[in-house]
Image (cartoon, rainbow, N blue to C red):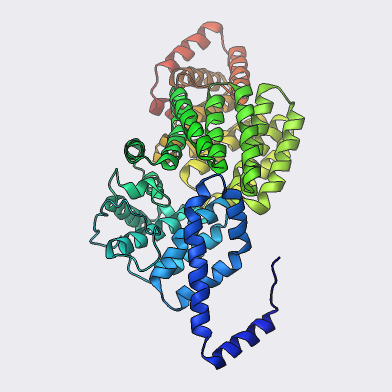
Amino acid sequence: MRYRLLETVGEYAAERLDEAGERGAVERRHLVYYRELARTTEPLLRGPGQRVLLDRLEREHDNLRTALRRAVAARDEQEALCLVLSLGWFWQLRDHRVDGSTWSEAAMGLGPDPFDEPVRPAPPLLERCIDAPPPMSPELLMEARREVRLVWLSNREHDIRGMDDPETQAWMRRVAVAYGPGQPQNCRVPGFSWYFVRLFIGDVSGIYRALDRGIEMCRELGYDWELAFHLQQRAKLLNEIPGRADLGLRDADESLEVFRRIGDAWGVAEALSGRAESHERRGAFAEAARDYREALDNVRVLGSTAQVPMLRCRLADVLTESGEIDGAEGERLLRQALEEAEPLNPDAAYFIRISLGIRIARNGGHAEAREILEGLYGELRDRSVPLFAGLLESVLGWLYALEGKPADALSRLRSALTTRDDPLTALVAAHLPVHMLLNAAFAHSALPGREHAETAARLLGAVAALRPAGLHEASAEREVRERTTAAARTALDGEVYERAYAEGGRLTLEEAVALV
């Protein structure tokens, strides 16, 4: 049973401690107790007892915040660093992103930035900064200053557009310089955030090399949990590379086996989700649905309610795509997932709104779909990465064409195609520009005149030639392709259509984009 003091009673007790000259000592004992609770619990959050331990930290969260507040007020950098690094994974698992951002920034303010010029390369460290209580050795203190900034960076999803400003880009490049591939600390929490730094600075080839080397090092050092984590991260990247979903499936399988052996429900859910994505890319929807359902079971066991809506969204999409449920039921499930996501996980809500908008449009609700998608674009236009903006504009182009507004659709799609050279798009959505071309062909086919019909046929030929081999054609894409083909064939003689289609098949991506 837990008792809470009224604020006035707490103030009275503090005054009595002041009078007795004991307040400082009592507050110090409180800080040390809760720092040790957080520090000794942190490594256990990646094992079979994680739900009980997460619930305990949740119950003690106010006391842990008080300990942090006192460390920061006293400008005790090492205590603040130890507390933040000990709580970072708890904040991640329970989606306390505001705490992660706020307290890491407060701890950062207590010491120098190790990524300031001139940047000192980080030495390889097998010892973790929180393996022992403070004080830290000079090497570990410098590493703790680096790692607390990675905690801060990983909690900046609310301001992802800020990653593009020149000052932040320069700072992240210094982070990338400080850590070379194969550092033991980059295999662990929170050091693995270094990989995402490479993502944000557009080092696409570097992130693959870094993940490959990280997996090798995890095997060399016997880091089981870290190996499973890196494998599921690489699996998710491989899922997005045309023709490599089978490799992603292999990594996801190994990751899942290790997480099951360790007893980490979060890791099991992540590995299952990654494997489900691999199945989706191959059109194996029954297998994908099975994995998404099991992933949902695991996050519920964990008490991580913020993860549930996104998994439910992915499951609804898979069930609808496979024909197991109809479009109306898919829409109902997506609305339910969105209702759950909005108070818990705003980022998930953004993606669910896209899925819901597409589903509503396919069900015939064009006006509502437009309201959802245009509203989302307006909210995120100035603070989202080019990949997300381009995806939204492509979907809006498709919707405008459905509504019989092909000229407006082409305007959106031309804007969307300006993101085709974005490094993040190349990394996680290499097929997106080809999908945009398909939507542009759809729009051209709806415009009057032989010229537009021929352009539609050429774009269809380009899409067929440029489409990555092995990429499953989703039902929405198939519908667009079939409607566009029928419209272009109706407007053109068979020989003219075939000639234009063949010409399109010889175009490069840039040449096809010029047709839009």
Q: Is residue 78 above or below residue 54?
A: below
Q: Residue at x 48, y 64 (%)?
A: 36
Which quarter of the rendering shows the N terminus? Answer: bottom right
Q: Residue at x 65, y 31 (%)?
A: 317
451 or 170: nearer the viewer? 170
Left or right, 284 with reference to 430 = right
Q: Is residue 299 visible?
A: yes
> In the current view of this chain or complex, which residue is farthest to the top?
495
x, y percent for residue 494: 55, 7
Q: Quadrant of residue 170?
A: bottom left
Left or right, 88 with reference to 509 = right
191 or 343: nearer the viewer? 191
Q: Quadrant of residue 315?
A: top right
Q: Is residue 220 above or below residue 135?
A: above
x, y percent for residue 117: 25, 62
Left or right, 264 with reference to 223 = right
Q: Is residue 486 above or below residue 318?
A: above
Q: Residue at x 52, y 63 (%)?
A: 37
> In the current view of this chain or complex, which residue is farthest to the bottom?
19
Q: Is residue 69 visible?
A: no
x, y percent for residue 255: 47, 33
230 or 468: nearer the viewer? 230
Q: How many marks?
A: 0
176 or 182: nearer the viewer? 182
Q: Is residue 345 above or below residue 222?
A: below
x, y percent for residue 29: 50, 75
Q: Residue at x 45, y 26 (%)?
A: 250
